[in-house]
Image (spheres, coloured by chain):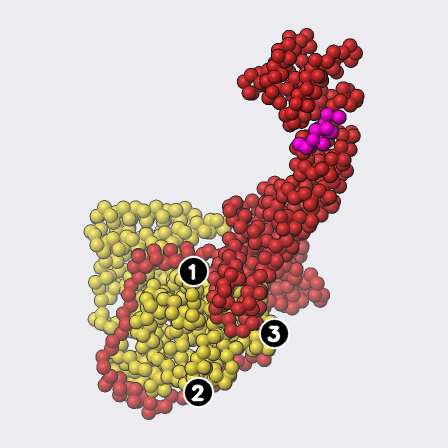
Amino acid sequence: MEISEERELHKAAQDIINQLSVILRTAQIHDPGNIAVVTAIEKFLLLIDLVTQTESQVKLEIVGEFFYLNDIRVRYPLEYLLNFDFLIREFKKREVGRVVFRNGIGSNDVQVFLRGFLAAGFSETPYETFTSVMIETDSIEIGSLKKIAEGTDADARKVIKRVYYHAVSFSQGVMTKIQAGEKVNIKKAKRIVESMVDHILEEEKLLIGMTSIKDYDEYTYHHSVNVSILSIALGQRLGLNKRILTELGLVALFHDIGKIEVPNDVLNKTTNFTEDEWKLIKKHPVWGLKAILKLRGLDNTSIRSAIVAFEHHLYYNLSGYPTVMKYGELDLYSRIVSLVDQYDAMTSARVYSRIPLSPDKALSIMMERAGSQLDPLLFKFFVNMVGVFPIGTLVMLDSKELGLVYESDVVFADRPRVMVIIDSKGEKVSGPVVNLTEKDATGRYLRSIMKTLDPNKYKVNLAEYLL
Amino acid sequence: METSDEIKEARDIVQTLLKAKKTLRMYPQNNPVYQKTLEDVNDRFREFFTYTGTLSLKIKQNSIFYEDEQVYSNPEKEDNLALFFFKDGLRELSFNKGLSREELEEFLRLIALDFDREAIDDDIVTLLWEKDFRNIQYVVDEAYLVDADAENYEQVAEEKLKEKVTDVNDLMRAYSDGFAEEDLKQISIVPLTDNDLQTLVKELEKDSGDKIDKLVSILFQLVHLAEQKSDFDDLALYCKDAITFAMKQGTISTVLDLMRRSREIIENQALPEDAKKNFRTLPFFLGADEIVGSLAEIFDSGVEIEEKVLEEYFLYLDKNAIEPLIKYLGELKTIRARRNIIQALIVLGKKDIHTVARGIEDQRWYVVRNIIYVLRKIGDRKAIEYLLKTIRHSDIRVRKEGIRTLGELGAREVIPALRECFGDPDIQIRIATAKAFGNIESEAAKRVILDQITAKEFREKDFEEKKEFFEVLSHWKDQEVFDFLLKILKSRFFFNRAKMFENKACAALCLGLLGNKDALPVLYEMRDSNNKLVSDFTGIAIKKLEYGN
């Protein structure tokens, strides 16, 4: 297939998903025979026809949080984001993971599909209800949502862990090299970030999960990598492409580079900073800018890195530090990095701030800052990304189990996967990992979060459970 | 296909890849050799895919394997295809049946890049990653990314992190507090709206532009944040880097912004001299060969630049820019680009006429002619000593331009040298010389023209040349010239009548140009001359005097 054809197919795939979402949304409001629904179906059939001219069928599948059309992953275009999210959510609600539209499909077949879809929405056994209706057509076939096999999950976690530690180790190497006046291998940095981008595109939740495990001793290096990962993940939510995500990831990785100029005895001081010491700390954005400009010649990435190094402690309303005069608005990358930097710093134990905040507490403080210190729109995307209960949150379930949020759910933000660490009998356990979207035979959720607790207050070592 | 055939074909494909890697580097895309090489590789793949779905090559340091059989080996470092991939961590490269010609060409162009010579910030894996080929997959050894001394980093870090096991008592306390803690107050997820997405699209559009302007604005924040002299020294270096970058990107407006800001710094009374000193060197930096070279490239690229922008930019240039400007003047391809450089030289020549004037020593005639033009536009008589050399230049176009310019500069000292030009074998030069005298407009110049017209040999000149001389004479609208012309008009002759009538016709024309109506009675008399040339030109002169046209 020629590249241009491939692009056309990809665009057609985006249009099909969007149009299917339009049909389902319209059908939730109007009668199936309503002109709005009928017109939407006609448009949908034209799109399907376009693809079935060259392919025998259109197979739409959900893998993780993404749609695949005829085995090709479909990127979320920004203009369709809401419709994509809607479709994922509605499919998951009905436990549908696959729909196949065969050549020769007509509007009657789509009407059957609609009936099944609507009926399943009110059923306690949605998938079964859906399939019982779909018997009426041979042109559309549905398949159930596949659960991720535990074995695959474990392998994926191993790979993600390796990627994460490569990045941390590299970050440490960079700092050491700059301090020693040696050259930094930018090609290698790019490769590290590309690897992170790839894994965020495929396994976003796992890599974000790694950022919740904080290493007090190696804070600076972990922090740089965490900020890079969270920035890439947020960038992905904003619809940035792979190349831009790499640039953003690189820029974020170097955002705190100015700290190498802060004397170690200040950086590692265990008591509160004096006024003079704070003055030193506050110089790291300027030192960072200078370090990057001295590192290598100017190019687009080094320019953006320098800008972010300078701006990442400037707030949305231009307060913060360093003090600026007659200044325009902050760069988009700076606003992204500043936001995730705050989140990671607040949820980490640092030398000068021994008690970290729990992730949910950090989010609620950040919510108060949105609009003044933080970009409110980006914060909205961020909360949607990390969920109401970010990974590492200690939660009490209504099943009388105590657990740690293990993985967030993109569709059901308040129903993450949780690792049980004390069972309902009050005994310490290590697992299982339970999915809070699971329901019993009557359609009621098996478990819900009742309360959140601060894991730091009880000295819970997240690494023990999440690594 | 038999396995042995497959291996043979895989071996051939690797060889064609190696050949293509060299060829595509050497030839442009439209060259037949380039196209033929591409076709060869494509044909090889097509042949292979007739029987097999995937060509998967295992990469070792100095060899390449297909199906456990070595299909390529090279112990040398030079031109080693295996090492080329291996050094960046690539361990397996697979091509699938769907591989299109377009995809293949893009792949070949990547491997053909000269990574040693070109300033490429990416390795082959990054480039493959960015291309995201549908039918070319690769496997990378990520261990390449880890320094040898950090191989166990992951294991050590994990063990260390897990060392501190959570105390059961703490956990139990959490468990019991879980029942006692107040009810959950979670933050809510606010769903994204269409309005949010529209705002985001606007943000992303706004963000897609160049960031150099932003960096420049940050650099000038550093002026107020600087604490010691070295901070200002650094700042000047960064500004120079920003100028270099902006010029390579073709954003003159960014450089102007930077220069304006630097001028504000220099003029700021409140700032110490240390802060200003380095900014004073920026105009000199703008004149560096590299920067002027970038400027020339921008001009040649055909991009539209507002005249106002250019004028302001030229004002910031220092005289050190003159030599590089002259150098690039001779290398530019477009007229518009040369016109811009000439404009810059006109501005700069006012600061240093001698350096601009020395440009006439350039070996390229067209550069010399442009420099003469610049000198004429500057109008500084200090350039005369240089211009005098040009009237003996081997190229007629240079001589003509030089003579014209000397005439316009109009100094007494140019007269002897210019007079010599009447002896030039080329009629165009002699006419240009006459016009130059006309521009000088002094009495001495008039005398030279009158001498030329009254000289015996003038009669024999072409009519066209004579006419030009008389037209030049009309610059002096005085009685002497009037009388001189009337005398020619009234003169009688018996020999060489045709040539003498030419003189009369020219004199009539000149009288018309003088604008003195006293000439009309004589001209009326001549209107009915039997000589058609005389009668025609007299008619023209009368019309001019009577109606002013």
**In the rendered image, is residue B120 in sight?**
no
- Is B313 positioned to the left or the right of B531 in the image? left
Q: Secondary structure at mark 1?
A: loop
**Discs 3, 1: same chain:** yes
- On the image, numbered disc 2 is attached to which residue? A270
Q: Type of residue at label 1?
A: Leu
Identity of the residue drawn at 24% across and 66% down:
A125
Q: Secondary structure at mark 3?
A: loop
Letter of the chain in red: B
Q: Type of residue at label 3?
A: Glu
- On the image, numbered disc 3 is attached to which residue? A182
Mark 2 Cα-neighbour bin, 10 Å: few <14, some 14–19, many ≥20: few
Mark toward the start of the polypeptide (3 vs 1): 3
**In the rendered image, is residue B519 in sight?**
yes
Image coords of residue B193 (percent x, y): 29, 59
Q: Are marks 2 and 3 in contact (CB under 8 Å)?
A: no
A30 vs B94, nearest the viewer: A30
A233 vs B6, nearest the viewer: A233
The span from disc 3 to disc 1 (Cα, nearest Å) is 33 Å
* Chain bearing mark 3: A
The span from disc 2 to disc 1 (Cα, nearest Å) is 40 Å
* Chain bearing mark 2: A
- On the image, numbered disc 1 is attached to which residue? A240
| Magenta segment boundaries in residue numbering | B441-451
